[in-house]
Image (cartoon, grey):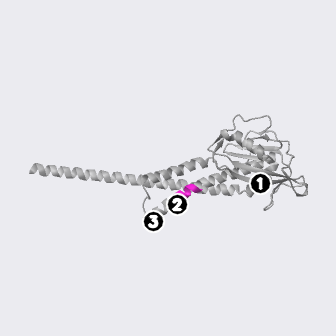
Amino acid sequence: MTIQSTVDQPTSPAPGGARRFTARALLLGDRIDVHGLEREDIISGVPLAFRSGAHGLVALYRFGVGVFVGLSPVEEDELLRMLAGRVTGDRGLIHDETAVLEISDSYDDRIPPGGPILLRDLSEARFLCLADALARSVALGRDEREVNSVLDVIEPFTVEMARRGRAPGPRRGILRLVGQALLVQHRVAGRIAVEEKPDVLWERPDLERLYARLEDEYELRERGQALQQKLDVIVETARTFTDILDANRSTFLEATIVLLIVFEICITFYEMFAASG
Protein backbone atom coordinates (compact mmCIF):
# COMPACT_ATOMS: atom_id res chain seq x y z
CA MET A 1 0.00 0.00 0.00
CA THR A 2 1.38 3.40 -0.98
CA ILE A 3 0.13 6.39 0.98
CA GLN A 4 1.71 9.72 0.33
CA SER A 5 -0.11 12.35 -1.72
CA THR A 6 -3.13 14.50 -0.92
CA VAL A 7 -6.17 15.77 -2.79
CA ASP A 8 -5.89 19.53 -3.08
CA GLN A 9 -8.90 20.56 -5.14
CA PRO A 10 -12.07 21.36 -3.15
CA THR A 11 -15.57 20.75 -4.43
CA SER A 12 -16.75 23.96 -2.72
CA PRO A 13 -15.16 26.75 -0.66
CA ALA A 14 -15.43 26.90 3.14
CA PRO A 15 -15.11 29.78 5.60
CA GLY A 16 -11.67 30.78 6.86
CA GLY A 17 -9.79 29.51 3.81
CA ALA A 18 -10.56 25.84 4.51
CA ARG A 19 -11.31 23.57 1.58
CA ARG A 20 -14.60 21.69 1.55
CA PHE A 21 -15.36 18.29 0.03
CA THR A 22 -18.33 15.96 0.02
CA ALA A 23 -17.81 12.28 0.81
CA ARG A 24 -20.52 9.85 -0.22
CA ALA A 25 -20.88 6.14 0.57
CA LEU A 26 -23.30 4.22 -1.65
CA LEU A 27 -24.82 0.82 -1.01
CA LEU A 28 -24.87 -0.61 -4.53
CA GLY A 29 -25.77 -4.25 -3.83
CA ASP A 30 -24.77 -7.35 -1.91
CA ARG A 31 -21.35 -7.78 -3.54
CA ILE A 32 -18.98 -5.88 -5.84
CA ASP A 33 -16.61 -7.91 -7.99
CA VAL A 34 -13.41 -5.83 -7.99
CA HIS A 35 -11.29 -8.43 -9.78
CA GLY A 36 -9.62 -6.89 -12.81
CA LEU A 37 -10.18 -3.28 -11.73
CA GLU A 38 -6.58 -2.84 -10.57
CA ARG A 39 -4.89 0.19 -12.14
CA GLU A 40 -1.68 2.21 -12.01
CA ASP A 41 -3.07 4.87 -9.65
CA ILE A 42 -4.16 2.31 -7.06
CA ILE A 43 -4.08 3.46 -3.44
CA SER A 44 -5.05 0.25 -1.69
CA GLY A 45 -5.77 -3.34 -2.65
CA VAL A 46 -8.24 -4.11 0.16
CA PRO A 47 -10.43 -2.20 -0.14
CA LEU A 48 -9.70 -1.42 -3.78
CA ALA A 49 -9.06 2.33 -3.72
CA PHE A 50 -7.87 4.54 -6.54
CA ARG A 51 -8.06 8.00 -8.03
CA SER A 52 -10.88 8.83 -10.41
CA GLY A 53 -11.86 11.87 -12.40
CA ALA A 54 -10.03 15.16 -12.08
CA HIS A 55 -9.54 15.23 -8.31
CA GLY A 56 -11.56 12.33 -6.89
CA LEU A 57 -10.84 9.35 -4.69
CA VAL A 58 -12.77 6.06 -4.78
CA ALA A 59 -12.85 3.03 -2.46
CA LEU A 60 -14.78 -0.12 -3.39
CA TYR A 61 -15.72 -2.70 -0.77
CA ARG A 62 -16.57 -6.29 -1.66
CA PHE A 63 -19.63 -6.19 0.60
CA GLY A 64 -21.38 -3.92 -1.89
CA VAL A 65 -20.38 -0.37 -0.90
CA GLY A 66 -18.54 2.31 -2.83
CA VAL A 67 -17.16 5.49 -1.24
CA PHE A 68 -16.47 8.59 -3.34
CA VAL A 69 -14.80 11.88 -2.44
CA GLY A 70 -14.34 14.85 -4.77
CA LEU A 71 -16.19 13.37 -7.76
CA SER A 72 -18.47 15.54 -9.86
CA PRO A 73 -22.00 14.18 -10.53
CA VAL A 74 -20.96 13.30 -14.08
CA GLU A 75 -17.83 11.46 -12.90
CA GLU A 76 -19.83 9.59 -10.29
CA ASP A 77 -22.46 8.53 -12.83
CA GLU A 78 -19.77 7.27 -15.20
CA LEU A 79 -18.19 5.23 -12.42
CA LEU A 80 -21.54 3.75 -11.39
CA ARG A 81 -22.26 2.73 -14.97
CA MET A 82 -18.87 1.04 -15.13
CA LEU A 83 -19.60 -0.87 -11.93
CA ALA A 84 -23.16 -1.88 -12.89
CA GLY A 85 -22.10 -5.22 -14.39
CA ARG A 86 -19.96 -6.05 -11.35
CA VAL A 87 -22.65 -5.64 -8.71
CA THR A 88 -24.67 -8.66 -7.58
CA GLY A 89 -27.85 -8.40 -5.56
CA ASP A 90 -28.66 -4.97 -7.00
CA ARG A 91 -30.83 -3.09 -4.52
CA GLY A 92 -32.59 -0.90 -7.10
CA LEU A 93 -32.97 1.93 -4.59
CA ILE A 94 -29.50 3.20 -3.67
CA HIS A 95 -28.92 3.87 0.03
CA ASP A 96 -26.19 6.33 0.92
CA GLU A 97 -24.34 8.11 3.71
CA THR A 98 -23.00 11.61 3.06
CA ALA A 99 -20.41 13.58 5.03
CA VAL A 100 -19.08 17.11 4.58
CA LEU A 101 -15.32 17.46 5.00
CA GLU A 102 -13.38 20.63 5.75
CA ILE A 103 -9.63 20.55 5.17
CA SER A 104 -7.15 22.98 6.68
CA ASP A 105 -3.58 22.78 7.98
CA SER A 106 -4.78 24.50 11.15
CA TYR A 107 -7.26 21.73 11.99
CA ASP A 108 -6.63 18.90 14.38
CA ASP A 109 -8.61 15.90 13.12
CA ARG A 110 -11.93 16.14 14.94
CA ILE A 111 -15.69 16.01 14.46
CA PRO A 112 -17.57 18.84 16.21
CA PRO A 113 -21.21 18.14 17.18
CA GLY A 114 -23.52 18.89 14.27
CA GLY A 115 -20.67 20.16 12.12
CA PRO A 116 -18.52 18.90 9.26
CA ILE A 117 -15.62 16.51 9.69
CA LEU A 118 -12.49 18.63 10.19
CA LEU A 119 -9.28 17.14 8.81
CA ARG A 120 -5.71 18.41 8.66
CA ASP A 121 -5.43 17.13 5.10
CA LEU A 122 -7.12 14.68 2.77
CA SER A 123 -4.22 12.29 2.40
CA GLU A 124 -4.83 8.85 1.05
CA ALA A 125 -4.47 7.40 4.55
CA ARG A 126 -7.10 9.73 5.99
CA PHE A 127 -9.36 8.98 3.03
CA LEU A 128 -9.12 5.24 3.75
CA CYS A 129 -10.00 5.80 7.43
CA LEU A 130 -12.98 7.93 6.44
CA ALA A 131 -14.08 5.53 3.69
CA ASP A 132 -13.95 2.56 6.05
CA ALA A 133 -16.19 4.25 8.62
CA LEU A 134 -18.71 5.43 6.00
CA ALA A 135 -18.78 2.05 4.26
CA ARG A 136 -19.39 0.17 7.51
CA SER A 137 -22.12 2.61 8.50
CA VAL A 138 -23.97 2.06 5.22
CA ALA A 139 -23.46 -1.73 5.41
CA LEU A 140 -24.75 -1.77 8.99
CA GLY A 141 -27.83 0.14 7.82
CA ARG A 142 -28.45 -2.58 5.23
CA ASP A 143 -28.02 -5.35 7.80
CA GLU A 144 -30.24 -3.55 10.31
CA ARG A 145 -33.05 -3.34 7.75
CA GLU A 146 -32.76 -7.04 6.92
CA VAL A 147 -32.74 -8.12 10.55
CA ASN A 148 -35.64 -5.82 11.46
CA SER A 149 -37.72 -7.16 8.57
CA VAL A 150 -37.31 -10.71 9.91
CA LEU A 151 -38.14 -9.58 13.45
CA ASP A 152 -41.32 -7.97 12.10
CA VAL A 153 -42.29 -11.35 10.63
CA ILE A 154 -41.39 -13.27 13.78
CA GLU A 155 -43.34 -11.05 16.18
CA PRO A 156 -46.89 -12.08 15.11
CA PHE A 157 -45.86 -15.75 15.38
CA THR A 158 -44.51 -15.34 18.90
CA VAL A 159 -47.55 -13.28 20.00
CA GLU A 160 -49.90 -15.94 18.65
CA MET A 161 -47.91 -18.70 20.34
CA ALA A 162 -48.04 -16.83 23.68
CA ARG A 163 -51.80 -16.32 23.32
CA ARG A 164 -52.76 -19.83 22.21
CA GLY A 165 -50.04 -21.82 23.97
CA ARG A 166 -49.15 -23.84 20.89
CA ALA A 167 -47.34 -23.53 17.59
CA PRO A 168 -48.98 -20.79 15.50
CA GLY A 169 -50.00 -21.32 11.91
CA PRO A 170 -49.46 -24.29 9.61
CA ARG A 171 -46.24 -26.24 9.50
CA ARG A 172 -45.28 -24.79 6.11
CA GLY A 173 -45.56 -21.23 7.41
CA ILE A 174 -43.32 -21.99 10.39
CA LEU A 175 -40.77 -23.68 8.14
CA ARG A 176 -40.79 -20.62 5.87
CA LEU A 177 -40.19 -18.39 8.91
CA VAL A 178 -37.31 -20.57 10.08
CA GLY A 179 -35.84 -20.44 6.58
CA GLN A 180 -36.02 -16.63 6.53
CA ALA A 181 -34.36 -16.44 9.94
CA LEU A 182 -31.54 -18.78 8.92
CA LEU A 183 -31.07 -16.92 5.62
CA VAL A 184 -30.67 -13.51 7.25
CA GLN A 185 -28.40 -15.06 9.90
CA HIS A 186 -26.20 -16.48 7.14
CA ARG A 187 -26.12 -13.23 5.14
CA VAL A 188 -25.50 -10.90 8.06
CA ALA A 189 -23.24 -12.89 10.38
CA GLY A 190 -20.26 -12.78 8.05
CA ARG A 191 -20.60 -9.04 7.50
CA ILE A 192 -20.57 -7.97 11.15
CA ALA A 193 -16.93 -6.97 11.52
CA VAL A 194 -17.18 -3.48 12.96
CA GLU A 195 -14.60 -4.23 15.64
CA GLU A 196 -11.91 -4.83 13.02
CA LYS A 197 -9.80 -1.76 12.28
CA PRO A 198 -8.87 -0.77 8.72
CA ASP A 199 -5.55 -2.09 7.44
CA VAL A 200 -4.20 1.43 6.93
CA LEU A 201 -3.86 1.84 10.70
CA TRP A 202 -1.08 -0.76 10.72
CA GLU A 203 1.04 1.68 8.71
CA ARG A 204 -0.39 4.85 10.22
CA PRO A 205 -1.06 4.24 13.92
CA ASP A 206 -1.13 8.01 14.39
CA LEU A 207 -4.57 7.98 12.72
CA GLU A 208 -6.14 5.65 15.29
CA ARG A 209 -7.57 8.62 17.17
CA LEU A 210 -9.22 9.88 13.96
CA TYR A 211 -10.74 6.47 13.29
CA ALA A 212 -11.94 6.21 16.92
CA ARG A 213 -13.72 9.55 16.49
CA LEU A 214 -15.32 8.33 13.26
CA GLU A 215 -16.44 5.14 15.05
CA ASP A 216 -18.07 7.27 17.75
CA GLU A 217 -19.67 9.62 15.22
CA TYR A 218 -21.39 6.79 13.35
CA GLU A 219 -21.87 4.63 16.47
CA LEU A 220 -20.35 1.65 14.70
CA ARG A 221 -19.60 -0.45 17.77
CA GLU A 222 -22.96 0.21 19.43
CA ARG A 223 -24.87 -0.55 16.25
CA GLY A 224 -22.81 -3.69 15.66
CA GLN A 225 -23.52 -4.96 19.18
CA ALA A 226 -27.24 -4.19 18.87
CA LEU A 227 -27.33 -5.95 15.51
CA GLN A 228 -25.62 -9.01 16.96
CA GLN A 229 -28.13 -9.12 19.82
CA LYS A 230 -31.04 -9.00 17.38
CA LEU A 231 -29.39 -11.68 15.29
CA ASP A 232 -29.05 -13.86 18.39
CA VAL A 233 -32.78 -13.39 19.06
CA ILE A 234 -33.58 -14.47 15.50
CA VAL A 235 -31.40 -17.55 15.75
CA GLU A 236 -32.82 -18.51 19.16
CA THR A 237 -36.39 -18.00 17.91
CA ALA A 238 -35.71 -20.14 14.85
CA ARG A 239 -34.26 -22.85 17.12
CA THR A 240 -37.33 -22.67 19.37
CA PHE A 241 -39.73 -23.03 16.45
CA THR A 242 -37.65 -25.93 15.11
CA ASP A 243 -37.83 -27.64 18.52
CA ILE A 244 -41.61 -27.13 18.59
CA LEU A 245 -41.92 -28.70 15.15
CA ASP A 246 -39.77 -31.64 16.24
CA ALA A 247 -41.84 -32.08 19.41
CA ASN A 248 -45.10 -31.95 17.43
CA ARG A 249 -43.77 -34.50 14.99
CA SER A 250 -42.68 -36.80 17.83
CA THR A 251 -46.11 -36.48 19.47
CA PHE A 252 -47.82 -37.25 16.17
CA LEU A 253 -45.64 -40.32 15.59
CA GLU A 254 -46.25 -41.56 19.13
CA ALA A 255 -50.01 -41.10 18.75
CA THR A 256 -49.90 -42.91 15.41
CA ILE A 257 -48.03 -45.85 16.93
CA VAL A 258 -50.51 -46.06 19.81
CA LEU A 259 -53.44 -46.04 17.38
CA LEU A 260 -51.85 -48.79 15.29
CA ILE A 261 -51.30 -50.91 18.42
CA VAL A 262 -54.92 -50.39 19.51
CA PHE A 263 -56.13 -51.21 16.00
CA GLU A 264 -54.05 -54.40 15.96
CA ILE A 265 -55.44 -55.42 19.37
CA CYS A 266 -58.98 -54.83 18.13
CA ILE A 267 -58.34 -56.96 15.05
CA THR A 268 -56.91 -59.72 17.25
CA PHE A 269 -59.95 -59.71 19.56
CA TYR A 270 -62.28 -59.69 16.57
CA GLU A 271 -60.55 -62.70 15.08
CA MET A 272 -60.74 -64.50 18.45
CA PHE A 273 -64.46 -63.83 18.79
CA ALA A 274 -65.07 -64.79 15.19
CA ALA A 275 -63.22 -68.10 15.68
CA SER A 276 -65.10 -68.95 18.90
CA GLY A 277 -68.45 -68.19 17.28
How far separated are the C-alphas under marks 3 and 1? 47 Å
Q: Which amino acid does the dot numbered 2 rest on? A: Glu
Residue under circle 2?
155
Q: Which is nearer the N-term, disc 3 or disc 1? A: 1
How far separated are the C-alphas under marks 2 and 1? 35 Å
| Residue 153, image x, y percentages | 53, 57
Q: Residue at 77% across / 48% down in the picture? A: 129
Q: Crowdedness of circle 1 by 10 Å Cα count: few (<14), some, many (20+)?
A: some
Residue 199 shows in the view: no
**Majority secondary structure in the magenta region:** helix
How far separated are the C-alphas under marks 3 and 2? 12 Å
Residue under circle 3?
163
Q: Which amino acid does the dot numbered 3 rest on? A: Arg
Nearest the viewer among 168 and 209 is 168
Residue 76 shows in the view: yes
Residue under circle 1?
99
The span shown in magenta is: 148-155
| Residue 3, image x, y percentages | 82, 41
Q: Secondary structure at mark 2?
A: helix
Q: Give left or right: position of 113 versus 91.
A: right
Q: Residue at 42% across / 60% down in the picture? A: 166
